[in-house]
Amino acid sequence: MSAKDALSEALGRAVRPEEGLTEYTIVAYWPALDSYTLDEESATWSSVEWADHLEDPIFENPFAASPRGDRHAIAHLDVRLHPGDRDLSGAEWAEIAHRFVRAAGIEIPGDANSCRWIAVQAKPGRLDLIANLIRLDGEWQHLPADLPRRLNDEARRIEQDLRLIPVATSDGPDRTRRPPTASTQLAMLLAQLADERVGPLATVRGLIENSAHRLACQATRPVDADNSHRLELIADRLRTVQEDLDTMAGRLATQPGPRTTVAPAPPAVRPSVRHTP
């Protein structure tokens, strides 16, 4: 399997030479890519161009080989959310991508000769990370021996940080987990309402603040300045409501729920990695 095959799997269809993959599909990539492209060029590459870019190190370094002596340099890591999880923003998917490539040892912060990799978000609830393990200096990037544990540990931290549905846990022969309680579901709803980036309250508050500013700039009567001040007070109250909702969401999310024995359930974040020739 080549980089093109891995990209086809991520897209759910064969790559098309004329198909441009925008920044909405390629949600993250290796830090040094910007030095290889012109302004905005990386946002319009076709799927074939992305695949060729990922495979270039294989041809540029004909003697690079893995510890096993092969040249299966393309690594494909896919991450899937729990079916009941909320929709994530592009920025959240990008954060997940960067955290997993660091956990996998594919990207090392401050390493100028790290691997080429991209993160593709082409299917709902799924992220595909495709990397070439041949570094820019021609050396092979050795993945950690405890890679599965590192990926699972990072998945658990991502679940907590992004308030995703937690994975099932194992306590012996029977797998047990806490099913989402009313408190957990309410916590997720309140967190979405209070979200400062995309929450509805933040949007309304922004409109009110903008209206207050415009009214203050165009004020010709004392009543205009007074109305502008009243709008600012309303915006301040909305900010307080957001903070209170966020605090309450945190309290509800930490409340223990009853443990029940259930059949194995899909994990919230399930990473799997494989090498492809």
Image: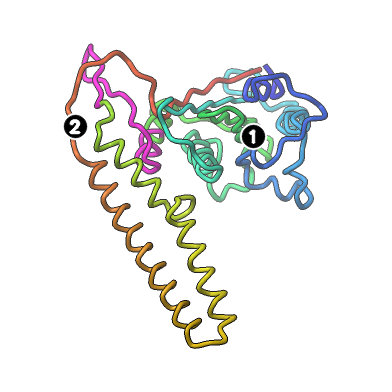
Please indicate, yes or no, whether residue 60 appears anywhere in the rendered image.
Answer: no
Depth check, front residue: 38 or 146: 38
Q: Which mark is residue 139?
A: 1
The image quadrant that residue 53 belongs to is top right
Counting the numbered discs, the total is: 2
Residue 72: image location, x then y, percent:
64, 20
Q: From the viewer's perspective, tell me whether residue 141 is left or right of residue 156.
A: right
The residue drawn where x is 28% and y is 29% is 180
- Is 161 drawn above or below residue 170 in the view shown? below
- Is 220 drawn above or below residue 93 in the view shown? below
The magenta region covers 155-178
Q: Which mark is residue 74?
A: none
Depth check, front residue: 196 or 21: 196
Q: From the viewer's perspective, tell me whether residue 13 is left or right of residue 233.
A: right
The residue drawn where x is 63% and y is 36% is 118
Residue found at the very far right of the displayed protein:
18
Scheme by which the image is coloured: rainbow
Residue 74 is one of the magenta-drawn residues: no
Neighbor class of circle 2 (other Cα within 10 Å; few <14, some 14-19, many 20+) is: some
Q: Quadrant of the N terminus?
A: top right
